[in-house]
């Protein structure tokens, strides 16, 4: 079943860099704690970092995915 997503606003190069740095920092913090995101989580996070989805959509996708692996 396809899920309709809201249109994403085009991000400037600076906004994309800021977003990528924030994601790298968050993943780095996870790794310091001994956690490693799996392939599916990494794909979802990458979509956000690349400006393909917004934060709310990333959170929803990660929440939905986490329910499938419990």
Image (cartoon, grey):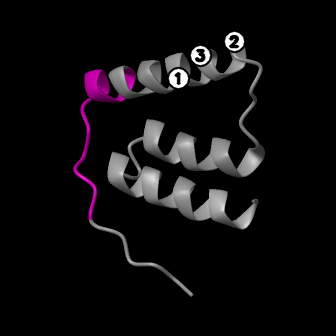
**Cα distance, mark 1 to mark 2?**
10 Å
Q: Residue at x 25, y 46 (%)?
A: 10
Element assignment for label 2: helix
Residue 29's tag is 3
**Cα distance, mark 3 to mark 1?**
5 Å
Q: Is residue 54 visible?
A: no
For disc 1, the marked residue is: 26
Q: Residues within 10 Å of mark 3 (few under 14, many from 20)?
A: few
Which sits earlier in the primary sequence, circle 1 or circle 2? 1
Q: At which x and y percent is residue 36?
A: 75, 30
Q: Quadrant of residue 20?
A: top left
Which residue, as the protein is rendered here, is positioned at the far top? Answer: 32
**Cα distance, mark 3 to mark 2?**
5 Å
Q: Residues within 10 Å of mark 1 (few under 14, many from 20)?
A: few
CB under 8 Å between discs 1 and 2: no
Depth check, front residue: 30 or 23: 30
Element assignment for label 3: helix
Q: At which x and y percent is residue 12?
A: 24, 31
Q: Which range of residues does the magenta coloring cover?
A: 7-17
For disc 2, the marked residue is: 32
Q: At which x and y percent is residue 9?
A: 22, 50
CB under 8 Å between discs 3 and 2: yes
Say above or below: 38 vs 27.
below
Residue 35, magenta (yes or no): no
Depth check, front residue: 26 or 12: 26
CB under 8 Å between discs 3 and 1: yes
In the image: residue 33, left or right of residue 10:
right
Q: Residue at x 26, y 64 (%)?
A: 7
In the image: residue 34, left or right of residue 9:
right
């Amino acid at each position: 079943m396809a899920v309709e997503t809201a249109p994403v606003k085009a991000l400037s190069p600076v906004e994309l860099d800021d977003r990528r740095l924030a994601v790298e920092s968050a993943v780095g913090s996870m790794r310091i704690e001994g956690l490693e995101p799996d392939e599916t989580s990494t794909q979802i996070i990458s979509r956000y970092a690349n400006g393909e989805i917004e934060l709310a959509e990333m959170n929803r996708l990660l929440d939905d995915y986490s329910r499938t692996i419990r």
